[in-house]
Image: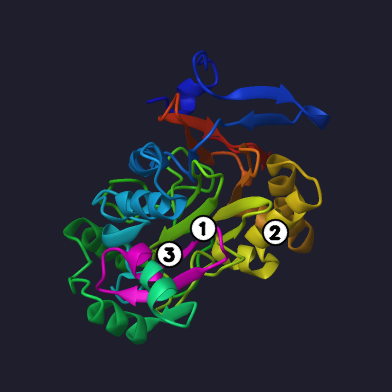
Amino acid sequence: MLNRRGLIGASLAGSALLSGKASAGETITKLDGPCVISTWDFGVAANQAAWAVLSKGGRALDAVEAGARIPEQDLKNHSVGRAGYPDRDGHVSLDACIMDELGNCGSVAALEHIAHPISVARRVMEKTPHVMLVGAGALQFAIEQGFQYEELLTPESKVAWEAWKKDAKYAPKANSEVGDYGKTTGQLGTPGGANNHDTIGMLAIDAKGNIAGACTTSGMAWKMRGRVGDSPIIGAGLYVDNEVGGATSTGVGEEVIRNVGSFLVVELMRQGRSPEAACREAVERILKKKPQAKDIQVGFLAVNKKGEVGAWAIQSGFSYALCDGKKQDLLLPGKATYQVAS
C-alpha cells in the first residue's frame, strides 16, 4: 500500500490512472471502468471491500455499503463506527447516509448502540417512506429491522474520554474530530496533520456506469450530545446525480452544511467544471463566506460520469483512496488552499 509520504515519488506505471494537464496546473485523474474512491488513508481497505462487489459485476449501491462497513467495524478507528470517540457525556452516536443512482436515499443521525449505521440508512431508504430517522426513533427502527443492540464505547475510547475530561472545557472545539488513529490519549490531531482522519465518504461507479455513494461517521469527538454534522445530510455530506457524478465531504460538518457542499460540487460539475475545479470552488466559497475557516479542515472528493476524479481541501493533509480494475490500493494526497506543517 502506498502511503501519503511515499506517494509523491512513487511510480504509477501499470495503473489504470491517466493524468493529463488541464487549466491552471490542474491534474485530471481518470479511473477506467468500474471504480470506487473514498476519503482518507483507511479508505484503501474500504475500497477493497467495495471492489469485491464491483469486480463481480455488482451494483454500486451494494459496493459502497460493503466498503463503508469496514471502517465502521475497525476498533482502531475513533472517528467512524463502533469505536468512535463519544460526546462530552460519554455517549457514542453515529451518523450515516447512502444514495443510489435513481436518487433514492436514506439516512440516520444521532444513532446509538448500533455498530453499522450505513446499513440502517439503507434500510431507511428501502423500507420506509422517509429519508432520515434520528435518535431514539432510528434506534427503534434498527432493532425492529434485526440489528444488534450493543455498547459502542470501547475501552480505548473510554480511556481517551476520561483523559479529555480532566482539563475539558464544555465548549465547541473546531476540528476536534481529527483524533489520532489507534491512540488512547485525549490529545487530538491538528488540522491537516499526519494523523488527520475523520468521516469516510465513498463513491462508486459500477459496470453499468451507475453511481452510488455512502458517508458514515461517529462525528466530532466530545461534541454536545445530539450534535449532527454534515455526514448524514443529503446534499451536504453526500450527493449523487447519475447524469453528472457524485461528491462527498469530510471535516468540520457545520461549514459543509452552511454551503450545502456536496450538492454544490455536483452542480458545478454539471456546469462544466472538472471534479477538482468543482471541489476547489466549493472550498473557496466556504473561505469567502467565513475567512476564519482557514483554521479548520474541510475537504471534498468527487467523481464525474467519465470516471474523472478530483479533490480539494482547506488545509493540506487530506488524502483519498482510489481503486479500479488495475490497482486497488492507490492513495493520493489531496490538493489544498493552505499548506500546514505535517
Please give left or right for residue 263 compared with residue 149 in the image.
right
Q: Is residue 327 magenta?
A: no
Residue type at tag 2: Gln
- Can you tell which mark lies on residue 292? 2
Which structural element holds mark 1? loop
Foreground pick, 124 / 201: 124
Q: Residue at x 36, y 47 (%)?
A: 180
Q: Look at the image and give the residue range highlighted in magenta.
A: 95-121
Q: Residue at x 76, y 57 (%)?
A: 285
Q: Residue at x 34, y 64 (%)?
A: 119
Which structural element holds mark 3? loop
Q: Nearer the viewer, mark 3 or mark 1?
A: 3
Say few, some or many: other residues with alpha carbon within 10 Å of mark 3 (under 14 / 14 to 19 / 20 or more).
Answer: many
Foreground pick, 167 / 29: 29
Which tag, 3 or 1, sits closer to the chain's start?
A: 1
Residue type at tag 3: Gly
Q: Which residue is mark 3?
A: 219
Which tag, 3 or 2, sits closer to the chain's start?
A: 3
Up the image or down, 111 lies above or below 157; here it is below
Location of residue 112 by image quarter = bottom left
Say few, some or many: other residues with alpha carbon within 10 Å of mark 1 (under 14 / 14 to 19 / 20 or more).
Answer: many
Which quadrant: the N terminus? Answer: top left
Q: Which residue is mark 1?
A: 175
As measured in the structure, the alpha-carbon distance from the residue carrying label 2 to the one carrying label 1 is 13 Å
**Label pair 3/2, CB-CB below 8 angstroms:** no
Answer yes or no: is residue 242 visible. Answer: yes
- Can you tell which mark lies on residue 287? none
Q: Position of residue 110 (x, y in %)?
A: 39, 76
Which tag, 2 or 1, sits closer to the chain's start?
A: 1
Foreground pick, 102 / 175: 102
Residue type at tag 1: Asn
